């Protein structure tokens, strides 16, 4: 929860820290983005490292580093110091998600217990996403900007004190050395790719953005080829040959793309069209977030008896209905937006817990960390891809629909014709009647872009339902005898692991 909360808690603090530290606009972007970039970049490395040195050990090392770096970030004296601290926090945060998920697999071999544990794990992550802006706003009302970094320190101290006694160690006893060249290749693949996608959404298509994406893809291909040639790869490519793993990861990436892109556009809509403050928008976002958490609880209870494909298909169709409702957001306003987004989030709720369970149960126990990193990385890549794709589409539609009034000066008309944010910045420089006219046409154009994006997302969710049926329909309910390994065939405790791959598969 804390790693996800730390992703969003900073958004409201940016104006305050920028004023205090004198951060430029470019430095502000790096302060907000570098944390997420490096979490995504190091997930694969940290998941595999946990398999080798021990998941509990890696978790405790990461927690100690995260707590110390949070204090450094809170008391940073310059933008450069804060950027470096946030970057290292991202590296430390990357140890937490795959380690916790791999430990859950080892601690709860019984299907019902594992399902409940992963359901709690998924709920905690979603709670972190939902509460980030809200907690950030509450702290900033009473304390200085650095307080948003300190909220995780007491929890990390508690983990360091209790973890050695409560968490069993687990690792792959036959793991080889970490291939540092593969680590470099994974970073060279993931970091430029995600950077390029986010910049495409923020600034539109340009040479730098396209080159970054291409560079990431090329290094990704080189990374895969190297993994195929190693006896002890950083990422075992053979995991993708397991249908439950490959099918689940594809679904996770695509759902995260649609969900992330839609949420990106709709939070902009709340602030720029519905004229809500960032804190008010964050509070309204609690409603669909609670719908998501509620859905996770339902799925956790049903997954033992209902085939995962049917739960995922039902969720995709529910999300498609929510997207159809969101096509009418220009007519229904904020109520339609929140209702439609809540339906979408309820529909995607099966993806987090079910994909995590399917991937973890299908992968051999000694590769639990590597499998966990795949599940987490897929979500990160999907979010970046969705924000870039739907953000670029919305920008193109906006630019084709907006009509800047003739009496708007050229220095304002240019930015206003490119984005609704540019229209708002320019309107602040204009007299009241001209500013109102400009904002009206900008909002109408943005409504058109949101409506088209929602239509595409509705079709995408329907297609995802078909894809799910084609790839995952054969999987038994997670509590069925043909699903996960029965209790007597559960992985041996950490001190008895022999590294053998279990014969029972999903």
Image (cartoon, grey):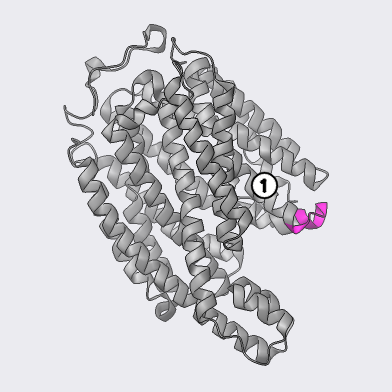
Residue 322: x, y in percent?
Answer: 33, 65
Q: In this view, does 391 lie to the left or right of 117?
A: right
Span of residues in magenta: 17-25
Residue 444: x, y in percent?
Answer: 50, 81
Q: In this view, does 506 lie above or below 267?
A: above
Q: Identify the residue at horizontal 49%, vertical 44% (top origin).
A: 380
User: Is residue 379 at all visible to an observer of this figure?
Assistant: yes
Residue 36: x, y in percent?
Answer: 58, 44
Q: Is residue 336 left or right of residue 196?
A: left
Q: Quadrant of the C terminus?
A: top left
Q: Is residue 471 above or below residue 373?
A: below
User: Is residue 2 at all visible to an observer of this figure?
Assistant: no
Q: Is residue 34 magenta?
A: no
The total number of labels drawn is: 1
- Which of these two is toward me, 207 or 293? 207
Residue 329: x, y in percent?
Answer: 41, 75
Q: Quadrant of residue 428?
A: bottom right
- Which of these two is toward me, 137 or 193? 193
Find disc 1 in the rendering and name its residue: 148
**Magenta highlight: main SS:** helix
Q: Identify the residue at horizontal 26%, vertical 41% (top origin).
A: 301
Q: Identify the residue at horizontal 80%, vertical 58% (top origin).
A: 19
Q: In this view, does 224 lie above or below 448?
A: above
């Amino acid at each position: 929860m804390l790693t996800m909360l730390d992703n969003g808690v900073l958004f409201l603090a940016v104006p305050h820290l920028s004023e205090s530290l004198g951060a430029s606009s470019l430095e502000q972007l790096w302060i907000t983005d570098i944390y997420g970039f490096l979490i995504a970049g190091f997930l694969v490395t940290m998941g595999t490292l946990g398999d080798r040195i021990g998941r509990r050990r890696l978790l405790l090392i990461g927690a100690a580093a995260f707590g110390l770096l949070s204090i450094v970030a809170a008391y940073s004296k310059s933008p450069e110091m804060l950027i470096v601290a946030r970057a290292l926090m991202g590296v430390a945060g990357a140890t937490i998600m795959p380690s916790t998920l791999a430990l859950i697999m080892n601690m709860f071999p019984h299907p019902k217990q594992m399902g409940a544990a992963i359901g709690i794990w998924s709920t905690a992550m979603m709670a972190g996403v939902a509460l980030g802006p809200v907690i950030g706003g509450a702290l900033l009302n009473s304390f200085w900007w650095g307080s948003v970094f300190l909220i995780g320190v007491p929890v990390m101290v508690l983990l360091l004190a209790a973890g050695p006694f409560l968490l069993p160690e687990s690792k792959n006893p036959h793991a080889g050395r970490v291939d540092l060249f593969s680590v470099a290749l994974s970073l060279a693949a993931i970091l430029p790719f995600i950077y390029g996608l986010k910049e495409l959404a923020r600034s539109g298509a340009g040479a730098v953005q396209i080159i970054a994406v291409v560079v990431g893809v090329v290094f990704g291909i080189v990374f895969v080829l190297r993994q195929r040639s190693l006896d002890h790869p950083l990422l075992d490519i053979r995991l993708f040959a397991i249908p439950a793993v490959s099918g689940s990861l594809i679904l996770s990436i695509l759902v995260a793309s649609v969900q992330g892109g839609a949420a990106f556009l709709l939070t902009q809509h709340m602030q720029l069209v519905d004229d809500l403050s960032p804190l008010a928008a964050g509070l309204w976002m609690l409603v669909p977030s609670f719908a998501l958490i509620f859905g996770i609880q339902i799925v956790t209870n049903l997954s033992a008896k209902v085939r995962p494909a049917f739960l995922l298909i039902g969720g995709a169709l529910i999300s498609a209905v929510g997207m159809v409702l969101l096509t009418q957001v220009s007519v229904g306003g904020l109520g339609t937006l929140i209702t439609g987004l809540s339906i979408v989030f309820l529909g995607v709720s099966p993806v987090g817990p079910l994909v995590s369970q399917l991937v973890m149960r299908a992968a051999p126990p000694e590769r639990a960390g590597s499998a966990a990193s795949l599940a987490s990385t897929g979500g990160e890549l999907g979010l970046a891809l969705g924000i870039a794709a739907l953000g670029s589409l919305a920008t193109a539609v906006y630019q084709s629909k907006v009509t800047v009034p003739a009496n708007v000066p050229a220095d304002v008309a240019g930015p206003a014709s490119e984005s609704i944010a540019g229209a708002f910045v320019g309107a602040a420089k204009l007299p009241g009647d001209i500013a109102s006219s400009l904002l009206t046409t900008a909002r109408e154009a943005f409504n058109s872009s949101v409506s088209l994006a929602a239509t595409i997302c509705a079709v995408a969710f329907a297609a995802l339902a078909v894809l799910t049926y084609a790839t995952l329909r054969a999987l038994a309910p997670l509590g069925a005898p043909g699903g996960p390994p029965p209790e007597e065939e559960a992985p041996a405790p950490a001190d008895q692991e022999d590294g053998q791959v279990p014969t029972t598969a999903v």
